[in-house]
Image (cartoon, helix red, strand yellow):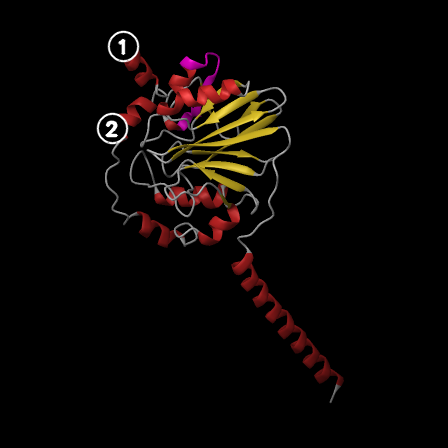
């Protein structure tokens, strides 16, 4: 056998070996790629996840443990007194109350909390069309103590949806743009399936795989997911753009029960409802 033939056979054997290894790697990724290393919060970072069983809304309390500055994400008006009590019991100074978007299924607790805890300021994205003390722009930093959240636009469920990312802690608050094994509907408030797909794939799925994702809602008792899980297991957003658009355009969902009451109130961060209660 010539030297050339022997060399060719060796190359073929090596190619076969690496091809088989590549297949095994892909199989292992699909079998085990959803499991990622758990990154612990820093010792000076407070995280609490609160829940409203009526709208299945999650509210998140974050704080710098050392200087006591705190922020509250996506509060619900019926639970404002609960949130106030927790803030006071922990000796925190609520600096900002912020929303991921202008909700259609519940009234935000932002306005009531501003009355209950004077000094805190409201925040929402400028593109939401809602009023607030501070209208957020892309890449803004929301600082509390030494910690901060980065504002990442993720429109598609509504035009003004944003995701709040805390890189140091490896977490992101995705609102309704990305839910656990799902996503927000795209048939009202300027929604668009094409826009939502691009938002998630370009701005959430590009985060490190181990990042924990905390949505605005969950209807099945789940509290958290990861980038890795949703990239592989989300039954909508793991599909191609064409398949995703087809799914979203054929959901045939009923008209949101609270939208006619919630959206007008949330345009003014729930202040309308607070004033209404005072007048009664």
What residue is shown at x 28% (from left), y 14% (from top)? 276
Q: Secondary structure at mark 2?
A: helix
Which label belongs to residue 8?
A: none
Residue 32: x and y, percent?
Answer: 55, 57
Picture layout, residue 49 above or below residue 3:
above
Residue 195 lies in what quarter of the image?
top left
User: Mark 1 — residue?
Assistant: 279
> Which quadrant of the rendered structure holds the N terminus?
bottom right
* Residue 217 appears in the rendering: yes
What residue is shown at x 27% (from left), y 10% (from top)? 279
User: Mark 2 — residue?
Assistant: 260
Q: Residue most toward the right?
A: 3
Q: Total of numbered circles in the picture? A: 2
* First in sequence: mark 2 vs mark 1: 2
Asked whether residue 36 is drawn in magenta, I would say: no
Asked whether residue 122 is drawn in magenta, I would say: yes
Q: Counting other residues with Cα less than 10 Å from the Cα at mark 1, is it few (<14), some (14-19), or many (20 or more)?
A: few
Picture layout, residue 22 above or below residue 72:
below
Q: Magenta residues, as a range?
A: 115-127
Mark 2–mark 1 Cα distance, whole angstroms, equals: 21 Å
Q: Nearer the viewer, residue 193 or 122?
A: 122
Residue 12: x and y, percent?
Answer: 65, 77
Residue 254: x and y, percent?
Answer: 23, 41
* Residue 95 appears in the rendering: no
């Amino acid at each position: 056998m010539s030297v050339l033939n022997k060399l060719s056979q060796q190359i073929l054997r090596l190619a076969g070996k690496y091809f088989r290894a590549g297949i095994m790697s892909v199989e292992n990724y699909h079998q085990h790629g959803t499991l990622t290393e758990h990154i612990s919060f820093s010792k000076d970072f407070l995280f609490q996840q609160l829940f409203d069983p009526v709208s299945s809304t999650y509210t998140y309390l974050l704080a710098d443990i050392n200087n006591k500055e705190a922020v509250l994400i996506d509060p619900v008006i019926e639970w404002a007194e609960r949130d106030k009590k927790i803030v006071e019991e922990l000796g925190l100074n609520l600096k900002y109350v912020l929303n991921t978007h202008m909700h259609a299924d519940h009234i935000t607790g932002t306005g009531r909390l501003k009355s209950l805890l004077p000094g805190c300021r409201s925040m929402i994205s400028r593109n939401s069309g809602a009023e607030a003390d501070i209208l957020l722009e892309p890449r803004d930093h929301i600082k509390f103590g030494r910690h901060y959240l980065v504002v990442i636009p993720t429109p598609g469920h509504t035009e003004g949806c944003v995701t709040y990312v805390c890189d140091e802690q490896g977490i992101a608050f995705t609102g309704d743009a990305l839910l656990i094994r799902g996503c927000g509907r795209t048939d009202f408030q300027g929604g668009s399936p094409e826009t939502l797909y691009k938002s998630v794939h370009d701005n959430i799925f590009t985060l490190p795989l181990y990042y924990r994702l905390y949505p605005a809602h969950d209807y099945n008792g789940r509290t958290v997911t990861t980038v890795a899980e949703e990239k592989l297991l989300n039954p909508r957003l793991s599909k191609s753009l064409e398949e995703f658009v087809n799914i979203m355009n054929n959901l045939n969902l009923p008209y949101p029960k609270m939208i006619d009451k919630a959206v007008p109130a949330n345009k003014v961060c729930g202040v309308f409802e607070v004033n209404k209660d005072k007048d009664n």
